[in-house]
Image: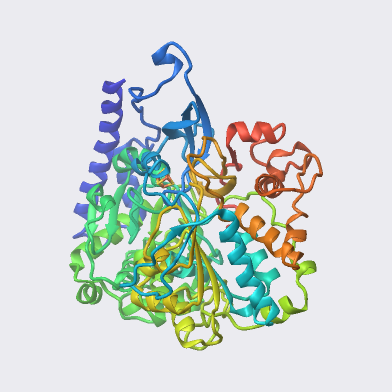
C-alpha cells in the first residue's frame, strides 16, 4: 500500500514539476497563449490530470474497542467539536460514563474520519480540575484589574434568583434597554438566549463577537458575486491554490478536512500563501509571498493586471474581445464596446479605472515582493484556470479598508472562472433547519418600547456604518460596545450577561473592556473556565462543555457538502453545570415567572416536542425539545426536504450528523 502511495504521489508530483518547468520557460516569453500552454501541458500530463484520494494509516493503539481488547468495554457516541469554528462532527469513546478517546465521525461527508490535534485536548478541558464547578458570587464590590473579586460558591437557586431580581428591577423601572447580552462561542441554539430572551425582556442590546472574528471577509464575495457568507474551496480538483491570510492547516476553517487532503493537494496543485507571517500552511506550501501587512489589495490588483495583459482570463466565464485580439495593454484605456462579457459585469470598467496601471512593478513598491515573483504567481494562477482558487481569509480583511482588499482578492476568482466551479470556490450547500418560534406575541408594551432604543455598539452611525448584506447598521461593531458602555451612549448599561466570551482579552485594546465591564453595576458570566472577563463578574455560572455535555447543533461546510452535526450530553457530568443557550435561560424564565413576569416562560413553552406535542416542563426537556424542533426537517421523514434521510429522531441521534446533497457546480452561472 505504501509503495503504491509513493508511486501515485510521485507521478502527480512529477506532472506538477513539469508544469512548473514550463511556467519558468514562459516567464521570459510574453507572447505565449493559454492555448499553446494547454497544448504543451497536455503533452506533459498525457491529456489527463490525475485525481484520487490517498491511503491513510489507521491508528488503533489507544482504542479500547472489541478489536483490541476482545470485549466491548465502552461505546462510540456521536458528538461535535467546537475547538474552533470548523465545527467537525466527532465520535467519542465513552467507558462507564467517562470520555476516553475522540475521532472523526465517519458519517460526516464534510470531515469524515479526519480530526485535528486540538480535538483531543477536549478531554483535558472537560475533566480540567480548574473548571468552574459551581455558581459563584463576587464579595468585593470594587471592580478592576487589581481588585480580587473574592468569589465564593453559592447555589444555583441563589445565583438565578439574583439575576432575575436584577432583570425585574429594569422591568419595574421601564429601563429594559439597559439590559445587555454578550455572545462569544455559540451553537445554533443561540437565539433562545441571544435573541428571544433579549427581545422579550425588552432590550435591543444583544452583541455578538462577530466583528472581531471574520465578518469583514463576507464583503469580498458579497460585493463581487452577491454571496454574503464564508466559502468552501474545492482543493481536491484545484491546480493552483492562492491562500490570502488564512491558515487552514492550523486555524479556521475545516482544519480537519483540509489537513486530510493537503498531501494530495500539494502533489497536484501549486500552493502559495500570501501572508506576512510564515504560517503553518505557508510552511507546507510551494511558495510564500511574505507581503507587507495591509498590502493585499495592491497585490490582488496587480495579479489581475497580469492575468488580463497576458490574456489568461477564463473566457468561458468572462467572455472575450469581439475580434479575439487582447487590448488589455498596460496604461491603455480599452473600449468597452469591444469586449463581450458572459457572466461577469464591468471588467473593462475595472480595467480602465483601476487595473491598467497596476503593474507588478507598481505593486512591488507597496507589497515588498519582487515584481518577478508577482508576475510568476499570476502565471501560475492563470495557467491553472478555472481550477484555481483565490482563497480569501481574514488577513487582508481585518485591516483598515479591508473590505476593498476582500473585494479585489475575491474578484480574481471571477477573472479566473473559479466561482462556483470545479477546483474553485463554492458557497454553502442548502440545509433545512428551522428558526425558533417568533417572540412578538410575548413582547409586552415595556419590551416593545425598550427594544426601540438604539444599540449600545452605535451601529449605523456615520462612523460605524457596519454594512451587512449592503445594509447600513445591519452588522455588529463588537469592540465599540465598550465605548458605548463607558460613555453611556446611546444609553447606560446596568445589567449584563456574557457567555463563552472573553472581550477583556480577545478584543483589540482590551483595557477599554476592562473599564467598561468594571462600570456595569451587575454582570453575570456563563463560562466553563474563569477568564479575564469573569474577573469583572458579580455572578459566575458554570457552563457545560460543547463536546460532551449539552444538546445543540452547528452547521459547517467543506468537501462540497454541508453538514448539521449534533451536540449531545454523552458522559456523566462531574459537577452541576448547566447549558448557556437553553437550560440557563429556561431557569431564568422560571425565576422571572415566580416574580410576576411569565412572558419568557410562556414563550419557551411553545417549543414543543415534535414527536409527542408535549410542552417542556423543565430545563432538560426544554433543551431537548428545542433541538428537536429546530432540526425536525432533517430527521422527520414526513418533513424530508433533501440530503441524508432518517427514519426519525433516534436514527438521527445515532448518526449524529446530517449531510446535504453534493455541491451543484456552475449552477449559479448565468
Ligand atoms: S478543526 Fe475540527 S476537530 Fe479541530 S478544533 Fe476545529 S472543530 Fe475541533
Number of numbered markers: 0
Q: Is residue 644 above or below residue 206?
A: above
Is residue 118 shown left or right of residue 155?
A: left
Q: Can I make out residue 670 in this image?
A: no
Q: Nearer the viewer, residue 547 or 367?
A: 547
**Quarter of the image where the C terminus is located:** bottom right
Q: Nearer the viewer, residue 253 or 200?
A: 200
Q: Is residue 470 above or below residue 26?
A: below
Which residue: 74% across, 68% down? 597
Q: Is residue 119 above or below residue 497?
A: above
Q: Can I make out residue 294 in this image?
A: yes
Q: Position of residue 128 (x, y in %)?
A: 37, 44
Q: Nearer the viewer, residue 83 or 403?
A: 83
Where does ligand 1 appear, by image quarter?
top left
Q: Position of residue 636 (x, y in %)?
A: 74, 39
Which residue: 66% across, 56% down? 586
**Quarter of the image where the N terminus is located:** top left
Colour style of the rendered protein structure: rainbow
Residue, far top:
70
Q: Nearer the viewer, residue 481 or 14?
A: 481
**Image quadrant assignment for residue 26:** bottom left
Which residue: 59% across, 32% down? 655
Q: Position of residue 474 (x, y in %)?
A: 58, 75
Q: Is residue 113 above or below residue 374?
A: above
Which residue: 29% across, 73% down? 295
Q: Position of residue 80 (x, y in %)?
A: 50, 42
Amino acid at each position: 500500500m505504501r509503495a503504491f502511495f509513493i508511486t501515485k504521489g510521485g507521478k502527480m508530483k512529477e506532472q506538477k514539476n513539469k508544469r512548473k518547468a514550463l511556467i519558468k520557460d514562459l516567464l521570459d516569453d510574453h507572447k505565449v497563449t493559454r492555448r499553446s500552454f494547454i497544448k504543451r501541458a497536455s503533452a506533459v500530463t498525457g491529456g489527463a490530470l490525475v485525481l484520487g484520494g490517498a491511503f491513510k494509516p489507521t491508528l488503533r493503539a489507544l482504542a479500547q474497542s472489541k478489536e483490541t481488547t476482545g470485549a466491548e468495554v465502552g461505546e462510540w457516541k456521536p458528538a461535535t467539536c467546537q475547538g474552533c469554528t470548523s465545527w467537525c462532527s466527532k465520535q467519542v469513546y465513552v467507558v462507564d460514563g467517562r470520555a476516553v478517546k475522540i475521532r472523526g465521525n465517519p458519517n460526516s461527508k464534510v470531515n469524515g474520519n479526519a480530526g485535528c490535534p486540538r480535538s483531543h485536548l477536549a478531554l483535558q478541558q472537560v475533566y480540567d480540575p480548574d473548571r468552574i464547578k459551581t455558581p459563584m458570587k463576587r464579595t468585593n464590590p470594587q471592580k478592576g484589574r487589581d481588585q480580587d473579586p473574592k468569589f465564593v460558591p453559592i447555589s444555583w437557586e441563589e445565583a438565578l434568583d439574583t439575576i432575575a431580581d436584577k432583570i425585574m428591577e429594569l422591568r419595574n423601572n421601564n429601563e429594559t434597554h439597559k439590559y445587555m447580552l454578550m455572545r462569544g462561542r455559540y451553537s445554533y441554539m443561540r437565539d433562545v438566549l441571544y435573541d428571544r430572551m433579549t427581545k422579550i425582556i425588552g432590550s435591543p442590546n444583544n452583541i455578538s463577537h462577530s466583528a472581531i472574528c471574520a465578518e469583514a471577509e463576507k464583503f469580498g464575495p458579497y460585493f463581487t458575486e452577491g454571496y454574503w457568507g464564508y466559502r468552501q474551496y474545492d482543493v481536491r480538483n484545484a491546480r493552483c491554490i492562492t491562500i490570502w491570510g488564512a491558515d487552514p492547516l492550523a486555524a479556521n476553517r475545516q482544519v480537519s478536512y483540509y489537513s486530510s487532503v493537503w498531501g494530495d493537494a500539494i502533489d497536484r496543485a501549486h500552493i502559495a500563501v500570501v501572508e506576512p507571517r510564515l504560517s503553518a500552511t505557508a510552511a507546507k506550501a510551494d511558495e510564500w509571498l511574505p507581503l507587507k501587512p495591509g498590502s493585499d489589495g495592491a497585490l490582488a490588483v496587480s495579479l489581475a493586471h497580469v492575468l488580463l495583459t497576458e490574456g489568461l482570463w477564463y473566457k468561458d466565464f468572462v467572455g472575450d474581445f469581439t475580434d479575439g485580439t487582447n487590448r488589455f495593454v498596460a496604461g491603455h484605456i480599452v473600449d468597452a464596446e469591444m469586449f463581450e462579457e458572459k457572466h461577469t459585469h464591468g471588467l473593462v470598467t475595472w480595467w480602465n479605472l483601476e487595473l491598467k496601471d497596476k503593474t507588478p512593478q507598481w505593486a512591488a513598491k507597496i507589497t515588498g515582493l519582487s515584481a518577478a515573483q508577482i508576475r510568476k504567481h499570476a502565471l501560475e494562477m492563470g495557467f491553472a484556470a478555472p481550477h484555481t482558487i483565490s482563497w480569501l481569509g481574514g488577513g487582508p480583511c481585518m485591516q483598515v479598508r479591508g473590505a476593498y482588499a476582500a473585494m479585489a482578492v475575491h474578484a480574481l476568482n471571477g477573472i479566473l472562472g473559479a466561482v462556483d466551479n470545479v477546483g474553485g470556490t463554492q458557497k454553502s450547500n442548502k440545509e433545512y433547519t428551522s428558526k425558533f418560534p417568533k417572540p412578538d406575541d410575548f413582547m409586552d408594551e415595556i419590551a416593545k418600547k425598550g427594544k426601540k432604543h438604539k444599540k449600545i455598539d452605535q451601529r449605523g452611525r456615520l462612523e460605524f456604518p457596519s454594512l451587512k448584506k449592503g445594509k447600513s447598521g445591519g452588522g455588529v461593531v463588537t469592540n465599540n460596545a465598550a465605548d458605548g458602555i463607558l460613555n453611556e451612549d446611546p444609553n447606560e448599561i446596568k445589567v449584563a450577561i456574557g457567555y463563552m466570551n472573553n472581550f477583556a482579552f480577545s478584543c483589540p485594546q482590551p483595557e477599554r473592556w476592562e473599564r467598561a465591564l468594571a462600570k456595569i453595576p451587575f454582570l453575570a458570566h456563563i463560562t466553563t473556565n474563569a477568564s479575564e472577563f469573569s474577573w469583572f463578574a458579580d455572578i459566575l455560572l458554570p457552563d457545560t462543555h460543547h463536546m460532551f455535555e449539552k444538546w445543540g447543533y452547528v452547521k459547517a461546510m467543506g468537501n462540497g457538502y454541508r453538514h448539521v452535526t449534533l451536540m449531545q450530553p454523552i458522559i456523566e457530568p462531574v459537577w452541576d453545570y448547566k447549558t448557556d443557550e437553553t437550560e440557563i435561560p429556561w431557569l431564568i424564565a422560571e425565576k422571572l415567572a415566580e416574580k410576576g413576569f411569565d412572558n419568557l416562560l410562556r414563550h419557551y413553552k411553545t417549543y414543543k416536542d415534535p414527536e409527542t406535542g408535549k410542552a417542556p416542563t423543565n430545563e432538560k426537556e426544554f433543551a431537548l425539545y428545542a433541538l428537536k424542533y429546530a432540526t425536525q426537517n432533517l430527521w422527520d421523514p414526513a418533513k424530508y426536504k433533501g440530503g441524508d434521510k432518517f427514519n426519525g429522531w433516534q436514527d438521527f441521534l445515532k448518526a449524529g450528523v446530517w449531510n446535504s446533497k453534493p455541491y451543484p457546480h456552475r449552477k449559479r452561472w448565468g
